Image (spheres, rainbow, N blue to C red):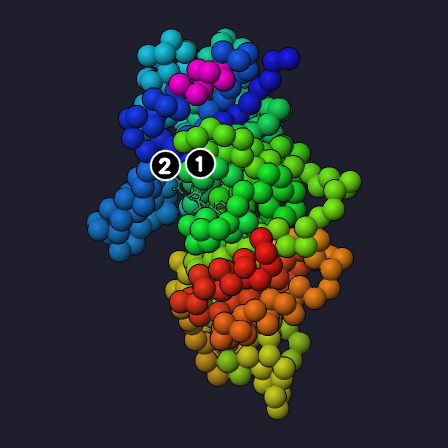
């Protein structure tokens, strides 16, 4: 049976000329096995980081429209080079920017959301026997500007295209051999998980396990696109991200993730009356900032403290919004803390196994680690702590839960 697959190659996978030729070779082999392939590529190696650094060197402002225009150039380099390497192997290939591939986004520069995909050009290229190679992480907004989808957004391009083209599945090629029980760069004993549910992967991606971008997992779950996360260095079978198998017993804890990219904002001595929280978070949301964890202390003599976490990049904007509201509601002051980190346990089996939280807290206590904030979902427990103890916490929890 002929399958249609989407293959996405991350930055390290197309990091230099040899890597690009190796990827071309794999695409050619996939075709020879009788499949149709659509390829999505990231920018080579650290190109995106280098471009951001360059932008900072020329400007203190970084107008978002121009930043997007700059960053999308990284993916253009890899898409055209890969098509050239494929041409050498006799594989007809044609490159498309996000806009040419019909990816329409909203107008929120640097973190645009895909609204619609018009994949006619890609369909025609496939029907004509070409391999379309699409620049990841980008699209064209409803007001016809070039946008990017947020860091790691090539995953989202790949999964969204898989859904739009009704691909049989989507392969995410990266520099590790799959989704591990913890970041293998932090826990050397972490091991590959052969299969994980969309729900667990969503929680992992949302809590810092950067192997898949959060938005890509949302697309995969909503459109039922099976994902295969695997290595472009060994090409061995990796991790399948699919629907939960109701026949199978779910592990209590499947994986541990960590995130050191957030900061904490605290609004102190907020008058404890209806409507104040709504005011604060409306202002933050209006500034386009994604709030993650929220904690409100018990009220003492009519006043309370409200703390929340935001991406560290958004500290200045969050402080500005919170300060404005603090004045209006007569809160005492707003402070920020950029030295926090978050460690999370994720596992579908938590739903039916009490005691996981207690074990997590006592493991951290034994390590002398202070917990500053806590949040839970049905299948996740997260603790905020000092940033410099995060790796120690991950290693201790990995050991304690025998992952
Ligand atoms: P790419 O450039 O291919 O998109 P990323 O750097 O975005 O690659 O994602 C792969 C990295 O994710 C790995 O190198 C690894 O350090 C990190 N990572 C974090 N958590 C996990 C996890 N649970 N399993 C596997 N990799 C993880
Ligand atoms: N090149 C972009 C980034 O570094 C997108 C991606 O790699 O997915 O974030
Ligand atoms: Mg990535």
Taking 245 as reference, is 391 above or below it?
A: below
Residue placed most toward the observer, 71 or 279: 71
Taking 335 as reference, is 245 above or below it?
A: above
Whichever of callouts 1 and 2 sits on the residue coming sooner in the sequence is: 2
Position in image of residue 361 (x %, y %) = 59, 70
Asked if residue 85 can be seen in this view, the reply is yes
Q: Is residue 28 magenta?
A: yes
Q: Is residue 96 magenta?
A: no
Q: Which residue is mark 2?
A: 12
Q: Residue at x 58, y 53 (%)?
A: 403
Q: Residue at x 56, y 33 (%)?
A: 228
Q: Which mark is residue 174?
A: 1
Q: For disc 2, does the CB lie below 8 Å from ligand 1? A: yes
Q: For disc 1, does the CB lie below 8 Å from ligand 1? A: yes
Residue placed most toward the observer, 184 or 203: 184
Position in image of residue 70 (x %, y %) = 31, 39
Q: Which mark is residue 27?
A: none
Magenta segment, which residues? 25-31
Position in image of residue 254 (x %, y %) = 62, 51
Q: Main secondary structure of the magenta part?
A: helix
Please state if 90 lies on the left or on the right of 5 as rendered: left
């Amino acid at each position: 049976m002929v399958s249609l697959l989407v293959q996405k190659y991350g930055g390290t996978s197309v990091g230099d000329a040899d890597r690009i030729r190796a990827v071309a070779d794999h695409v050619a082999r996939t075709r020879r096995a009788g499949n149709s392939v659509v390829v999505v590529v990231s920018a080579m190696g650290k190109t995106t980081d280098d471009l951001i650094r360059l932008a900072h060197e020329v400007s203190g402002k970084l107008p978002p429209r121009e930043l997007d225009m700059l960053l999308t150039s990284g993916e253009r380099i890899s898409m055209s080079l890969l098509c050239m390497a494929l041409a050498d192997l006799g594989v007809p290939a044609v490159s498309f920017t996000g806009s040419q591939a019909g990816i329409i986004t909203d107008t929120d520069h640097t973190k645009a959301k895909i609204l619609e995909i018009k994949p006619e050009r890609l369909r025609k290229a496939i029907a004509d026997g070409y391999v379309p190679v699409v620049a990841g992480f980008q699209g064209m907004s409803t007001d016809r500007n070039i946008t990017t989808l947020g860091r790691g957004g090539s995953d989202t391009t790949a999964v969204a295209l898989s859904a739009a083209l009704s691909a049989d599945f989507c392969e995410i090629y990266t520099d590790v051999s799959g989704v591990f029980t913890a970041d293998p760069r932090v826990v050397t004993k972490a091991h590959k998980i052969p299969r994980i549910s969309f729900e667990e992967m969503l929680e992992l991606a949302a809590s810092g396990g950067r192997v898949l971008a959060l938005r890509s997992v949302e697309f995969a779950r909503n459109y039922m696109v099976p994902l295969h996360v695997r290595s472009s260095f060994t090409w061995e079978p990796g991790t399948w991200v699919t629907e939960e198998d109701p026949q199978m017993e779910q592990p209590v804890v499947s994986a541990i993730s960590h995130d050191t990219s957030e900061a904490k904002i605290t609004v102190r001595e907020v008058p404890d009356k209806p409507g104040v929280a709504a005011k604060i978070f409306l202002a933050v949301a209006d500034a386009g900032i994604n709030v993650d964890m929220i904690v409100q202390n018990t009220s003492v003599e009519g006043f309370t403290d409200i703390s929340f976490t935001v991406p560290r990049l958004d500290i200045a904007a969050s402080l500005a919004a919170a300060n404005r509201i603090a004045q209006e509601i007569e809160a005492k002051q707003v402070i920020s803390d950029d030295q926090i980190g978050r460690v999370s346990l994720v596992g579908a089996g938590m739903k039916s196994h009490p005691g996981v939280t207690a074990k997590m807290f006592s493991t951290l206590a034994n390590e002398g680690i202070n917990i500053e904030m806590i949040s839970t979902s049905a299948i996740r427990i997260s603790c905020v702590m000092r940033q410099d103890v995060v790796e120690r916490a991950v290693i201790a929890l990995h050991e304690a839960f025998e992952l």
